[in-house]
């Protein structure tokens, strides 16, 4: 079963410096039917104005993935980590027992990100942060970017029963993704226009997937597709 969640139905708010849209209940947006999808708790579609960002603030016991769609994000935390993550690349923060961080757009153009939160396998782990480049031009089919599953050694590690993958498809190209029995997925085209098992989705729409073993994603236009496979 596939459920389309059009971008126009998402919650959110425009704060001037931040134009945020929420696929799931977050901050002032509350919808009891959109609290989570399996252990996927948050998928925020954020556009951050140049020279602005999120000042230092704390988190705990959550796996927080930032997928940069356009521009770059600069990270700093109380563990001493600093980094700049560019478009197509990924950073992962395991909040664990507690971490305080800031995320700023220090660029001259808007930065666009997906911020994805996944509930960890267990609480009370030591906090950690990491980032890795995944050049968009080097992706063939779906590429694993972050994962808590065995065998995904080339990706960033997360402490959750989940996997984040992405594909960059030219118009007419198809990529397949297989889901194990009992798994769910949530899929968003960052750009373009796609069909998933015959269901059409525009850029920034969400598709919630359950009881499907194979997803066939076909690009109607050149498209960048992000998918999370969750328990």
Image (cartoon, rainbow, N blue to C red):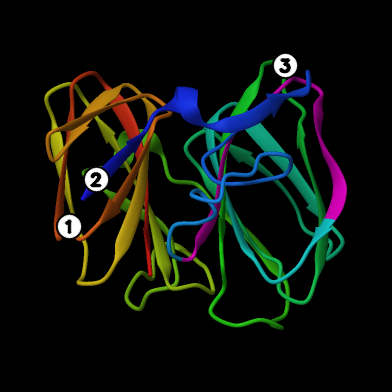
Sequence-earlier tag: 3 or 1: 3
The kind of secondary structure element at disc 2 is strand
**Image quadrant of residue 73?**
top right
Q: Which residues make up the magenta segment?
A: 39-57
| The furthest residue to the front | 32
Residue at horizontal 60 percent and vertical 46 percent from the top: 25
Number of the front mark, 3 or 1: 1
Are discs 3 and 2 less than 8 Å apart at CB?
no
Sequence-earlier tag: 2 or 1: 2
Taking depth in this image into account, of 139 and 218 the one nearest to the observer is: 218
Q: Position of residue 220 (x, y in %)?
A: 18, 21
**Image quadrant of residue 207?**
top left
Q: Position of residue 85 (x, y in %)?
A: 62, 41
Q: Mark 1 highlights which residue?
A: 212
Number of the front mark, 3 or 2: 2
Magenta-colored stretch includes residue 201: no
Are discs 2 and 1 less than 8 Å apart at CB?
yes
Q: Mark 2 highlights which residue?
A: 2
Q: Mark 3 highlights which residue?
A: 108
The kind of secondary structure element at disc 3 is loop
Q: Residues within 10 Å of mark 1 (few under 14, many from 20)?
A: some
Q: Residues within 10 Å of mark 2 (few under 14, many from 20)?
A: some
Taking depth in this image into account, of 70 and 120 the one nearest to the observer is: 120
Task: Report how far apart the C-alphas of labels 3 and 2 lie in the structure.
Answer: 39 Å
């Amino acid at each position: 079963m596939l459920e389309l969640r059009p971008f126009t139905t998402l919650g959110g708010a425009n704060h001037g410096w931040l134009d945020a849209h929420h696929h799931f209940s977050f901050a002032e947006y509350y919808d009891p039917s959109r609290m989570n999808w399996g252990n996927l708790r948050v998928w925020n579609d954020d556009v951050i104005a140049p020279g602005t960002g999120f000042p230092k603030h704390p988190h705990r016991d959550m796996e927080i993935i930032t997928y940069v769609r356009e521009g770059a994000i600069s990270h700093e935390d109380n563990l001493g980590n600093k980094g700049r993550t560019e478009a197509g690349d990924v950073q992962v923060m395991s909040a664990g027992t507690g971490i305080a961080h800031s995320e700023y757009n220090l660029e001259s153009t808007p930065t666009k990100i997906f911020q994805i939160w996944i509930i960890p396998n267990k609480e009370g782990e030591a906090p950690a942060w990491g980032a890795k480049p995944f050049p968009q031009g080097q992706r063939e089919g779906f590429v694993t970017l972050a994962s808590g599953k065995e065998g995904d050694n080339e990706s960033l590690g997360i402490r959750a029963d989940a996997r984040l993958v992405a594909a960059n498809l030219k118009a007419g190209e198809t990529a397949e993704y297989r889901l194990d029995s009992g798994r769910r997925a949530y899929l968003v085209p960052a750009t373009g226009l796609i069909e998933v098992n015959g269901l059409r989705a525009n850029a920034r729409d969400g598709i919630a997937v359950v009881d499907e073993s194979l997803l066939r994603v076909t690009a109607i236009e050149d498209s960048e597709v992000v998918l999370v496979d969750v328990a």
